[in-house]
Image (cartoon, rainbow, N blue to C red):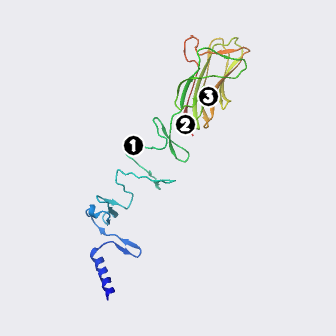
């Protein structure tokens, strides 16, 4: 008789409270057409709004939508995961993410003047610019022996943003397409027979060159080209002349003023 009384008492409480019910395969949440007051006393309660067809819970101040992602702003979270803390996939034709305002990316090598760059897998990092300009390291003429391959010492740096140029050699900090410009000036061939060759060396092997017949007056040779480099490839410039005499490069020019008639510059066009 005592057991029967307890059972009747339990049924009575359930029927009276209209509270959450445990069913065999589900939980029945109270259904309302309009949200009741959400305050500290109601904190933690859950309801189903039949007007909006959304599940909500009270955080002590507001009803929070549980039917999809809903964050109280400003929102900050910290976590650790080898893959992703947040992944958004749009299986339709639209965008996976839209913002009305700026974005900030930190912790991936950020710095003033850097460019956000992606690798082949879509991983983004901040990468700094690569650019340098150097001139011949002296005002006097530079002797070039007969049939001798001679490296030009461009030792006066005007700038070297990536610290990739040293004395006469540029070392690529990253794989990509690079553009180089260079000019040398001969003081004029002693005896005008023969020719001069101006070379760009990639990893100490001549990759490109420019020929010109010797002239008695000062004359210049130029190189301007794009070249593909891998990280740590080197680029330098050299000259070769075949005229049966020693010849000279000049950094003062025809009018004998203190100009920069021999220079070497380069910059990264596109990373790969």
Camera-nearest label, 2 or 3: 3
Residue 132 visible at all: yes
Mark 3, residue position? 169
Q: Which residue is mark 2?
A: 270
Q: Position of residue 187 (x, y in %)?
A: 63, 13
* Disc 3 crowd, CA 10 A, few/some/many (<14, 14-19, 20+): many
Q: Are marks 3 and 1 in contact (CB under 8 Å)?
A: no
Q: Nearer the viewer, residue 77 or 30?
A: 77
Q: CA distance from mark 1 to mark 2?
A: 25 Å
- Residue in the image at 38% along x and 75% along y: 23
- The image quadrant where one finds the N terminus is bottom left
Relative height, residue 69 to residue 207 (above, below): below
Do residues under tags 2 and 3 come within 8 Å of each other at their CB atoms? Answer: no
Upstream in the sequence, badge 1 or badge 2?
Answer: 1
Q: Secondary structure at mark 2?
A: strand
Instruction: Give the mark toward the camera: 1 or 2.
Output: 1
* Location of residue 33 by image quarter: bottom left
User: Mark 1 — residue?
Assistant: 102
Image mark count: 3
Q: Residue furthest bottom?
A: 1
Mark 2 surroundings within 10 Å by alpha-carbon count, few (fewer than 14), some (14 through 19), many (20 or more): few
What's the mark number on residue 78? Answer: none
Q: CA distance from mark 3 to mark 1?
A: 40 Å
Q: Position of residue 129 (x, y in %)?
A: 51, 34
35 lies left or right of 245: left
Contact, CB < 8 Å: mark 1 with mark 2?
A: no
Report if residue 38 is visible in the image. Answer: no
Q: Quadrant of residue 40?
A: bottom left
Specify the farthest residue to the left: 37
Q: Secondary structure at mark 1?
A: loop
Q: Secondary structure at mark 3?
A: strand
Q: Nearer the viewer, mark 3 or mark 1?
A: 3
């Amino acid at each position: 008789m005592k057991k029967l009384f307890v059972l009747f008492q339990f049924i009575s409480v359930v029927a009276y409270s209209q509270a959450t019910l445990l069913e065999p395969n589900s939980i029945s949440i109270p259904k309302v057409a309009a949200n009741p007051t959400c305050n500290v006393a109601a904190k933690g309660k859950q309801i189903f709004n039949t007007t909006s067809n959304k599940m909500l819970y009270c955080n002590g101040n507001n009803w929070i939508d549980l039917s999809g992602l809903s964050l109280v702003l400003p929102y900050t979270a910290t976590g650790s995961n080898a893959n992703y803390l947040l992944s958004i996939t749009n299986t339709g034709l639209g965008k996976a993410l839209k913002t009305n305002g700026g974005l900030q990316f930190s912790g991936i090598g950020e710095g003033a003047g850097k460019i956000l760059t992606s690798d082949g897998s879509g991983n983004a990092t901040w990468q700094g610019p690569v650019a340098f300009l150097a001139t011949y390291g002296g005002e006097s003429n530079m002797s070039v022996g007969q049939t001798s391959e001679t490296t030009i010492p461009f030792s006066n740096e005007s700038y070297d943003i990536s610290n990739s140029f040293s004395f006469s050699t540029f070392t690529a900090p990253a794989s990509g397409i690079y553009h180089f410009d260079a000019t040398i000036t001969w003081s004029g061939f002693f005896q005008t027979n023969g020719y001069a060759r101006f070379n760009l060396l990639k990893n100490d092997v001549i990759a490109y060159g420019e020929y010109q017949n010797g002239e008695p007056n000062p004359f210049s040779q130029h190189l301007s080209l794009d070249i593909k480099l891998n990280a740590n490839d080197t680029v330098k410039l050299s000259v070769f002349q075949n005229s049966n005499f020693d010849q000279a490069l000049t950094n003062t020019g025809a009018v004998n003023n203190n100009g920069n008639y021999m220079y070497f510059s380069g910059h990264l066009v596109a990373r790969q």
